[in-house]
């Protein structure tokens, strides 16, 4: 059965209308999807420091640290200037600082480990901190000269 030219034209118009409806619907759907995505997206410049820090990791290698041996413990120090200051201290004071601040030992525990009384540990720690402070301040002064 052969269609008349008017029937062919009618069918063509129906197809065109259906195609237009489909394209309009897809365009609306795409715009809604973009609007939803835009509502959830945030530019990097709008992120806080803590949010940015969650987006990446930094590899850490043992070679990035300075290793100290203290009474059978390995203590790793990352800050080069602090490591220099610790090396400038006498061995006992250097050990007390490392045990106290890097291994979280109390004065009593350090005294027992090093066979000295608690008050001696306290005095050594206090004077070592003063020397470290003096060393670091001296280095800071050298940088600004």
Image (cartoon, helix red, strand yellow):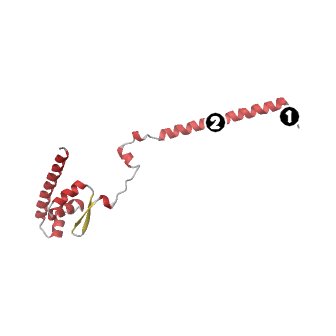
Look at 83% across and 29% down and name the residue there.
6
Look at mark 1 in the image and give the residue it sits on: 3
**Secondary structure at numbered mark 1:** loop
Q: Is residue 135 above or below residue 49?
A: below
For the N terminus, the image quarter is top right
Is 130 left, or right, of 25 in this rendering?
A: left
* Outermost residue to the front: 145
Q: Position of residue 102 (x, y in %)?
A: 24, 60
- Viewer-proximal residue, 105 or 66? 66
SS at circle 2: helix
Tell me the quarter of the image containing the C terminus: top left
Q: Which residue is mark 2?
A: 25
- Count of marks overlaid on the render: 2
Q: Nearer the viewer, residue 117 or 55?
A: 55
Q: Which residue is painted at 18% across and 64% down in the image?
A: 95
- Is 53 drawn above or below residue 34 in the view shown? below
Q: Judge the density around disc 1: few (<14), some (14-19), many (≥20) Cα neighbours within 10 Å.
A: few
């Amino acid at each position: 059965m052969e269609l008349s030219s008017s029937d062919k034209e009618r069918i063509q118009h129906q197809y065109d209308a259906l195609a237009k409806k489909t394209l309009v619907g897809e365009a609306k759907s795409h715009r809604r999807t973009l609007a939803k995505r835009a509502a959830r997206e945030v530019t990097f410049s709008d992120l806080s420091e803590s949010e940015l820090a969650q987006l990446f990791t930094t590899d850490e290698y043992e070679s990035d640290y300075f290793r100290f041996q203290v009474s059978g413990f390995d203590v790793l120090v990352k800050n080069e200037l602090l490591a220099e200051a610790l090396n400038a201290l006498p061995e006992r004071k250097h050990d007390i600082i490392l045990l106290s601040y890097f291994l979280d030992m109390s004065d009593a525990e350090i005294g027992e480990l090093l066979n000295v009384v608690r008050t001696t540990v306290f005095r050594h720690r206090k004077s070592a901190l003063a020397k470290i402070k003096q060393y670091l301040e001296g280095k800071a002064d050298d940088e600004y000269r």
